[in-house]
Image (spheres, rainbow, N blue to C red):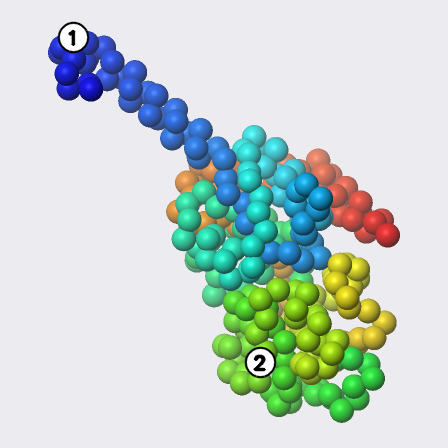
């Protein structure tokens, strides 16, 4: 259409068209796809995704004046979307050395303290080291940080599940011997699944992967968006919003 216009009209409309395209591109970049998996920190509510991690993500987006469409997927899909799709934010994801260069990191949601757990009444399951744990069947979430950690350590007895609920059911029915869980959020895990915390006990700490759960951006997301979100995260920490959100979660029965 532009080619059919006379030269004076083209000269008049071309800058307007370029400006309009730039504005449209800017607006699209201001809305992020936000992906996560169902778990104790984020879960499907009646009308929207809820949970303490979700509240924190929303607070950061609001502070940065960026909107986001939050959706829950099985972890493998959420992770793949975040790795391959521009303008995608993912949470709550363990920050591991293997993932460090694949994402743009925003801020920590929660520190991690991973340990192997067994059912208390299953005393035959009694490893005392990582090496001894190899002989037992361990339940993991597909492509999660735990799964990747055990693969790197060349564990052979692994049962891979697609979500937390299936993972816990296998453990409670003794179809897997051990699970690995974050002890700092164990109570929330129990409350949001069929797991009874009174029936399990930690047996082996894993300091190698006890770093933290983070929110992060796909690598192809612009530096401008990344810097704004990092600044927004720091701002809500300084204002006490982060602490307030976490305290609210701890008081939830």
Q: Are marks 1 and 2 in contact (CB under 8 Å)?
A: no
Mark 1 closeness class: few <14, some 14–19, many ≥20 residues within 10 Å: few
Name the residue nearer the viewer: 93 or 6.
Answer: 6
Locate residue 89 relative to residue 163 in the image: left or right: left
Q: Position of residue 136 (x, y in %)?
A: 64, 87
Give the distance between the C-alpha atoms of the residues marked 1 and 2, in whole angstroms: 70 Å
In the rendered image, is residue 114 in sight? no
Looking at the image, which residue is at 51% across and 77% down?
A: 151
Q: Is residue 82 left or right of residue 215?
A: left
For label 1, the residue is 8
Q: Is residue 119 above or below residue 90?
A: below
Vertical relation: 9 (above or below) 159: above
Give the position of the N terminus as an image quadrant. top left
In the image, farthest residue toward the top:
8
| The residue positioned farthest toward the front in the image shown | 46
Whether residue 123 appears in this view of the structure is: yes
Identify which residue is drawn at 72% across, 39% down: 241
For residue 98, side relative to residue 248 (left or right): left
Question: Dot 2: what SS?
Answer: strand
Per the image, the residue denoted by label 2 is 158
- Which disc number belongs to residue 171? none
Q: Position of residue 185 (x, y in %)?
A: 74, 60
Q: At 29% from the left edge and 22% from the top edge, which residue is drawn?
A: 18
């Amino acid at each position: 259409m532009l080619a059919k216009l006379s030269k004076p009209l083209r000269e008049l409309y071309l800058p307007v068209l370029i400006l309009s395209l730039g504005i449209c591109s800017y607006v699209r970049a201001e809305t992020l796809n936000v992906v996560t998996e169902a778990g104790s920190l984020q879960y499907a509510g009646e009308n929207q995704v809820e949970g303490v991690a979700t509240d924190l993500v929303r607070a950061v987006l609001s502070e940065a004046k960026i909107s986001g469409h939050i959706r829950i997927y099985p972890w493998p899909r959420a992770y793949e979307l975040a790795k391959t799709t521009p303008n995608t934010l993912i949470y709550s994801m363990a920050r591991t050395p293997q993932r460090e260069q694949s994402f743009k990191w925003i801020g920590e949601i929660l520190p991690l303290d991973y340990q192997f757990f067994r059912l208390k009444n299953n005393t035959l399951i009694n490893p005392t080291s990582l090496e001894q744990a190899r002989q037992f069947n361990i339940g993991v979430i597909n492509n999660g940080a735990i799964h990747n950690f055990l693969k790197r350590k060349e564990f052979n007895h692994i049962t891979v599940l697609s979500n937390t609920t299936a993972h816990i059911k296998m453990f409670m029915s003794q179809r897997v011997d051990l699970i690995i869980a974050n002890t700092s959020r164990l109570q929330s895990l129990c409350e949001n699944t069929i797991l009874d915390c009174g029936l399990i006990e930690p047996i082996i700490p894993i300091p190698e992967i006890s770093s933290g759960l983070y929110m992060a951006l796909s690598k192809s997301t612009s530096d401008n968006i990344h810097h704004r979100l990092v600044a927004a995260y720091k701002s809500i920490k300084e204002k006490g919003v982060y602490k307030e959100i976490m305290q609210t979660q701890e008081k939830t029965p």
